[in-house]
Image (cartoon, rainbow, N blue to C red):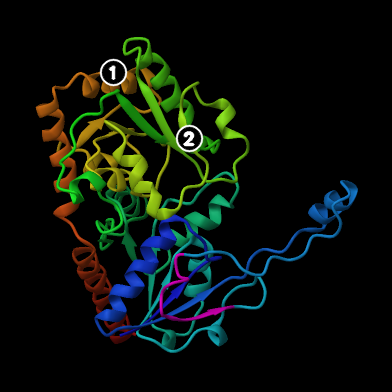
Amino acid sequence: MKITFVLPTLGLTGGMRVLAIYTELLQKRGHKIFIVSLPLPQPTLIQQLRSLLRGRGWLSAPKTQKSHFDKVDVESRVIETNRPITDLDVPDAEIVMATWWETAEWVAKLSPSKGAKVYFLQHYEAFDYVPKGRVEATWRLPMHKIAVAQWLADIARNEYGDLSVSLVPPTVDTKQFYDPQSRAKQPRGKQLVPTVGMYYTTTPWKGCDIALKAFSIAAKKIPNLRLVAFGCGHDGPLADLLPEGTEYNKEPTQDQLKEFYSKCDAWLFSSRSEGFGLPILEAMACGTPVIGTPAGAAPELLAGGGGILVKPEDPEDMAKAIEQICQLSDAEWRAMSETALETVRNYTWEDATNLLEAAFYTALERQAQLTNKT
């Protein structure tokens, strides 16, 4: 098949990583992928004026940005300005896939020759900073929906009456995320010093305030409890807000992430909202149990026993889970760690790509049915 992915600005988000992996795997299977995306946003007039007033001069327009597609051999096009993508920007194909609510508006207007229209649902994007009515309208579009998590498929079914959504969860690359000790044939046990970890950001919906409060509560009962954290590197002076003694890296490389996950007896996933929640699987792939709020795919991923699902907005419940894991015997902890690993081993990227391919063929069948009716 010829397949076009219509993307917003390329970057290093988890969603982009997932799509880059699918691009590689689909092309290995003989499909032809074309990527079309938006350019980096230009500085606004207000930003320019602020820069001038602060003596920093006129801001130059950004030209490039790192992306998970940088190392992928795929035909791609970045359009010249930030505008809707049209027929002139994309080739004829069997499938054309929107990946964000705004791209769904554009894909819906493309000619039938551009392919059967698919909407890849990675989140319910009715955020405060976007027009909610327009987002909701995209969920009603006659496009085949592919959801990355069950809660998104449930919204499509229960709120928008779409009964044919394809569920295609992502996974993680176990060649990138693994416990380094296991590769040295030294299976890990509990840490000598009880340790939990977290991703740290001031973004409210990531719920770091919940995780930090839970750590503070648990530390009163586990005096030597240690915290490991990493951040995104562009979110302010975060380290000043972390508890004293925290090991913090503001911007680790993708290859360094496994080192942080593997230092922990448990990983704290405290999000208030997530499309999927890839850090859960990243930690599990490193053999680290996860203590998670019921955001994204956490309810499904933790149901098997590779961690503990806690109540939303409840630091006390998360603190109890921290105590519970830290109080496990080494044998009990290893059993939970092995369950976490099996959660990842039992669902590979090849499995995910099989489901994605099947979803594309379903989209083609639905398009054919609609064409025959008309």
Decide: is 195 above or below 95: above
Q: Which residue is mark 2?
A: 248
Q: Position of residue 265 (x, y in %)?
A: 26, 30
Mark 1 vs mark 2, foreground winner is 2
Residue 126 picture location, percent across and down: 50, 49
**Secondary element type, mark 2:** strand
Give the image location of residue 57, x and y in percent: 86, 56
Q: Which mark is residue 182?
A: none
The three-letter amino acid code for the residue at tag 1 is Lys
The C terminus is located in which quarter?
bottom left
The answer to whether mark 1 and mark 2 are in CB contact below 8 A is no
Quadrant hosting residue 186 = top left
At a point 34% along the width and 67% down the height, the residue shown is 21
Report the residue at 28% width, 86% height from top: 372
**Image position of 239 with respect to 97: above or below:** above
Please give the label number shown on residue 320.
1
Residue 16 is a magenta residue: no
Q: Residue at x 75, y 60 (%)?
A: 43
Segment tinted magenta in the rendering: 68-78
In the displayed structure image, the side of residue 86 where residue 47 appears, left or right? right
Determine if residue 277 is in view: no
For residue 8, side relative to residue 315 (left or right): right
